[in-house]
Image: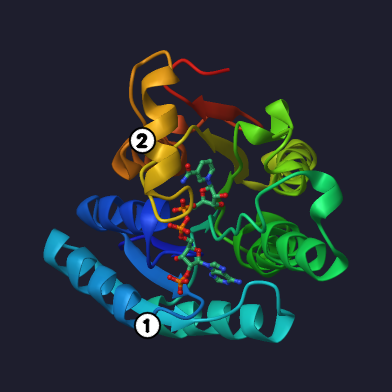
Amino acid sequence: MAKAAIVTGGSRGIGASICRLLGADGWNVVVNYAGRADAAEAVVREVEAAGGRALAVQADVALKADVDRLFAAGDEAFGGLDALVNNAGVIGRRGRFEALDGPVMEEVLAVNVLGCMLCALAAIPRLSTRHGGRGGSIVNISSGNAVSGGPGESVLYSVSKGAVNSLTIGLSQELAGEGVRVNTVSPGLTATDMPGEEKLAAIGPTIPIGRVAHPDEIAEGVVWLLSDKASYVAGANLRIGGGRP
Ligand code: NAP
């Protein structure tokens, strides 16, 4: 039977690549999105063209009722769950930390941190053998910013990704003995809408490898971590950064 994955923020960028590559590997994929139904439906068609089955589901990962509806839709469509990719994320307002305000902080932490935790909460009873699940895998998408801190530009975002790293460190140890491997992927600068054209063009040549990542280059690491080939990998933080620490 084909395995089933929920990919949050699967409509664009890195998440869309993860959905497409999972489809090519024969997975059934729930393509979650926040507002871009058109983009999510296009990814569904691409997954299907690659050989998998897919379903687009709108849900704000920061809202528990939406997350519960997202996971219920996956159960109904594919009869269970084998993997969660906590990929949905927002950057917030760029600039110095002192220019931030409460609502921006709440939004970034709600999507990037609370969203990952709510989705993990929904996934654990479905995956963990302790709850009668059949085992599986969770990949949390972090960022090199968790380590760099993003001074002058994205301290808030960096803080949120530091929390994502901690989530993996703790959860991986709680769940490894229950058939659930939890890992992090930390992408470097990747050609998506999030950084924008200007930043991609300016920073690309300064990266040791000489360019930014294509989203597929990040997705390959995620799909490997979800696969049985990574059967002994738990609690890892796979940095895919083109030589950038
Ligand atoms: P992106 O192109 O901006 O796409 C963001 C995705 O997240 C979209 O599918 C969007 O849905 C979805 N999303 C946003 N808020 C959501 C919410 N509240 N609930 C559900 N879905 C939501 O981003 P990306 O560059 O692919 O980034 C993907 C992940 O990689 C993020 O966690 C990001 O922090 C991380 N990352 C990115 C880079 C980079 O350079 N791009 C580097 C390091 C880490 P809609 O299409 O419906 O808006």
In the rendered view, does 101 fall on the left or right side of 241?
right
> Taking 168 as reference, is 229 above or below it?
above
> x, y percentage for residue 214?
31, 39
> x, y percentage for residue 188?
49, 32
Q: Earlier in the sequence, mark 1 or mark 2?
A: 1
> Which element type, helix, strand or loop, lies under badge 1?
helix
Q: Which residue sits at x=38%, y=68%?
A: 11
- Colour logic: rainbow
Whether residue 178 is visible to the viewer of this picture, yes or no, is: yes
Q: Marks 1/2: CA distance?
A: 28 Å
Q: Nearer the viewer, residue 101 or 188?
A: 101
| Mark 1 neighbour class, 10 Å CA radius: few under 14, some 14 to 19, many 20 or more | some
Residue at which label 2 appears: 201
Q: Amino acid at mark 1?
A: Ala
Quarter of the image holding residue 114? bottom right
Q: Nearer the viewer, residue 156 or 187?
A: 156
- Asked if labels 2 and 1 touch by Cβ distance under 8 angstroms, the answer is no
Q: Which residue sits at x=43%, y=77%?
A: 79
Residue that lies at the very extreme toward the left in this rendered image: 49
Disc 1 residue lies near ligand 1 with CB under 8 A: yes
> x, y percentage for residue 90?
60, 59
Q: Amino acid at mark 2?
A: Ala
Residue at which label 1 appears: 37
> Which element type, helix, strand or loop, lies under badge 2?
helix
Whether residue 227 is visible to the viewer of this picture, yes or no, is: no
